Amino acid sequence: MKFVAPNTLENDKVILRIIEPADFDTLYQVAKDPLIWEQHPNKDRWKEDVFRGFFEGALACKSAYLILDKESGACIGSTRYYGLDEAEKSIFVGYTFYARAYWGAGINPLVKEMMFDFAFNFVDKIYLHVGAENYRSQKAVERMGATKVAEKMVSYVNEPERKNFEYALAKSTWLRAKR
């Protein structure tokens, strides 16, 4: 079975919907907050021209999502699948960001759980790139059971190479944690 990102994923709190070209302005309204990017390797992604490159990369990958608050319908961020390696049976999950109003609200674990549960139907390992200075995200992925496996320079789509930590989460670890 080949991995294909579903058009939507949803739970009680959020809906993930594949990004469309018309979503730029909606998503940029969230992304233009400089504090979202404060610990991120690409600290200037809040600028419209830089964000446009990020958005074009999201469209091109065909597996990037708009994250919507299920109750209000408001856009609260974005995330994506990328870097599928069929030989290793692995995929990356990342490029995730949220409006600050949703920080600490338990949304990230819910989003990642949906994405991981779906992906583990097709792959045995999920990787995540986290900026070397992004302490919030490092803690978040470690709480989900991922372990740091490498430090490397990563070229983000349409952006310069930056130092990142690579985390891995095995399907067996994820399934054990969910019991």
Image (spheres, rainbow, N blue to C red):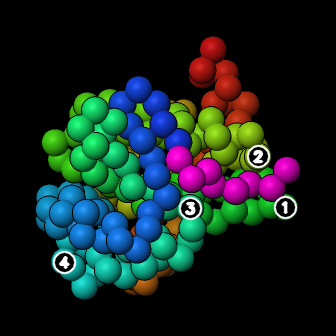
The residue that appears at 34% across and 66% down in the rendered structure is 23
Q: Secondary structure at mark 1?
A: loop
Percent of width and height locating residue 94: 48, 56
Identify residue for label 1: 87
Q: Is residue 4 located in the magenta-colored stretch of the structure?
A: yes
Marks 3 and 1, how far apart at CA: 19 Å
Q: Is residue 70 magenta?
A: no
Between the residue at mark 1 and the residue at mark 4, the CA separation in whole angstroms equals: 37 Å
108 relative position to 91: left or right: left
- How far separated are the C-alphas under marks 3 and 4? 23 Å
Residue 82 % position (x, y)? 59, 63
User: Which callout, 1 or 2, points at the residue further toward the start of the chain?
Assistant: 1
The amino acid type, in three-letter code, at marker 3 is: Ser
Q: Identify whether 168 is placed above or below 95.
A: above
Badge 4 is on which residue? Answer: 47
Label 2 residue SS: loop
Image point 54% across, 36% down: which residue?
114
Residue bounds of the magenta highlight: 1-8
Q: For residue 21, what is the image quadrant?
A: bottom left
Tell me the SS state at disc 4. loop
Callout in the foreground (1, 4)? 4
Check disc 2 and report the residue beneath it: 122
Q: Three-letter amino acid code at disc 4? A: Lys
Residue highlighted by disc 3 = 63
Q: CA distance from mark 2 to mark 3?
A: 15 Å
